Image (cartoon, rainbow, N blue to C red):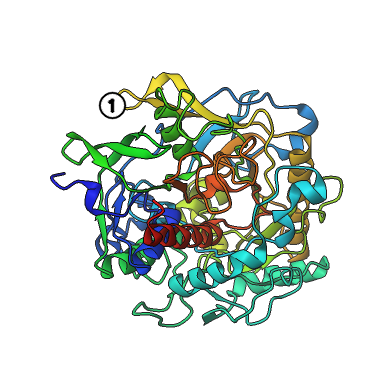
Amino acid sequence: MAKTAEQFDAVVVGSGPGGAAAAWALAEAGARVLVLEAGPRYDPFADYRLERPDWEARRFPEKVPTRGRQSFAPLQELDPAWRDLRSWNLHRGPMVAGPRRAAWAYHHVVGVGGSTLHFAAEAHRLHPDAMRMRDRFGVAADWPLTYAELEPFYETAERIVGVAGPAISGPGADARPRRRPLPLPAHPLSHASRHLARGFAALGMGWQANTQAALSRDYDGRPACNYCAGCGRGCPRTDKGSADVTFVAKAEDSGRCVLRPGTRVLRLEAGLGDRVAQLLVAGPDGRVARLAARSVVLACGAVETPRLLLLSAGNRAPHGLGNESGQVGRNFMETLFWTSSALHPDNLGSHRGLPSDIISWHHNAPDAVPGTVGGCRFSAGVAEADLVGPMAYAQRVVGGWGRAHHRRMAETFGRVLTVGAIGESLPNDGTYVDLDPRAHDDLGAPKARIHARLDGGDLVRLRFMARTARDVLAAAGCDDPFEEYGAYDAFSATHVFGTCRMGDDPRDSVVDASGRSHRWENLYIADASVFPSSGGGESPSLTIEALAIRTGTILAERLRKGEI
């Protein structure tokens, strides 16, 4: 910690898809960038040991445990009217036994690359209509920029991570126009997903090969995917376009970006002239220091970014830095999800293949689900349900013991089909992030506390997702499901949004269309906390990266002009 940040034009806090992409854009434009990351680096070739006999038991090798890193307020009581949405397994019974919604997890990774280290590599653009939810449908909020304004930055992100996908958008996906083809051709569907395609088609649902940040051929010095289905455990080959092997690597190669892993930002300190003056940080050795800041980009995610702003309250910002509107932490949106798994009569080898290689956008538009506002998508889900190894089959698919169990394992392995669904999450008064007055981290600071509630429209959408997933499996030739779980009775979020909403009006948003605080001249946010709406099931990483590249480009120009 001997150096100070005074030699840098920008300090970026966080190195997930937002922080990494913003740092790359700044460095590419000639700015000097310091990236502070609370977690460590991961070495893909040493840390992701999928060749080991115990690969299935190891899961993603968290170096910083994430369970308990945040706290949860008591979640809502469960209503018997929605009992068909309870999570269950044929052999193990109910997954949530109590009368309240369970807090399973906020799934994230603390480390260089953030949650892209364990994501399934889906790379989606947002449906343009999902950017006008308030204007067109009277819910959530409108984005202060258009799809057309964001498209050039989508193209840059797709080029950097190496997105593979269809040359021409399929049915239900042509609402996302592209000026240019994707960098790589689509991955071939697995044998199992071709059966799902028949199920989609039988129900009149359009489908296509998914757009994914996983290489379908060698690209930019990285090898093509080998279809091991291990994305969630970390990619040991670097074919998955996680932020560490793409944006971070390129930013460091520029010679204008310095990365400091293991450095925790404790608070931001406001100075004169509506500027952030310093960051209080704790280095890997635990020593605390102050770093001067010409500009700051926060990219800690939609839970930890509002926490840091609220922890930064002081005389000049009594309610939290950037919280003049009172909206920091508000408008939280979680992952509204459903997963149904069933056995197919044939051995499909469904433990192999790229996760989520097939997708249906048929119900993705905000007005596509009957009886509610907000769309959803459906995709192959075997790998994301972690049904790709014998341990999972023994514990969740095949009942019994002894010889009968052994015989049934041999008969069953590779026959599971899973349909996963993700839908629009709409903010309400019961969904927000604040500071927990009772739970503190190891340095004594209050933890982020998650408040989550599903409203009636969310439940209507979720029921539609569940029934459609079951219908797709039946149309694909499967037996009745043996396991189903979803967001109704369990908070289990990978995609979270909205706690520092962007907008044109400083009275009801935190940042403007460029990601800059409405008040603080040199403070920017570049993660999913700025999303005014979640979209109808799109994976957010590509949109985070596109927004962050745009933010970094705008900030670099202001720095060049001496406006900061």
Q: Nearer the viewer, residue 89 or 296?
A: 296
Q: Residue at x 68, y 29 (%)?
A: 429
**On screen, 501 above or below 407?**
above
Q: Residue at x 60, y 76 (%)?
A: 189
Residue topped by disc 1:
443
Q: Residue 166's x, y, as percent?
A: 62, 79
- Quadrant of the frame with the N terminus: top left
Q: Residue at x 60, y 45 (%)?
A: 335
* Residue 21 visible, this angle: yes
**On screen, 270 above or below 129?**
above
**On screen, 388 above or below 186?**
above
Q: Kindly indicate the quadrant of the structure image that contains residue 171.
A: bottom right
Q: Name the element at disc 1.
A: loop
Q: Nearer the viewer, residue 16 or 29?
A: 29
Q: Residue 240's x, y, as percent?
A: 42, 68
Q: Kindly indicate the quadrant of the structure image that contains residue 420.
A: bottom right
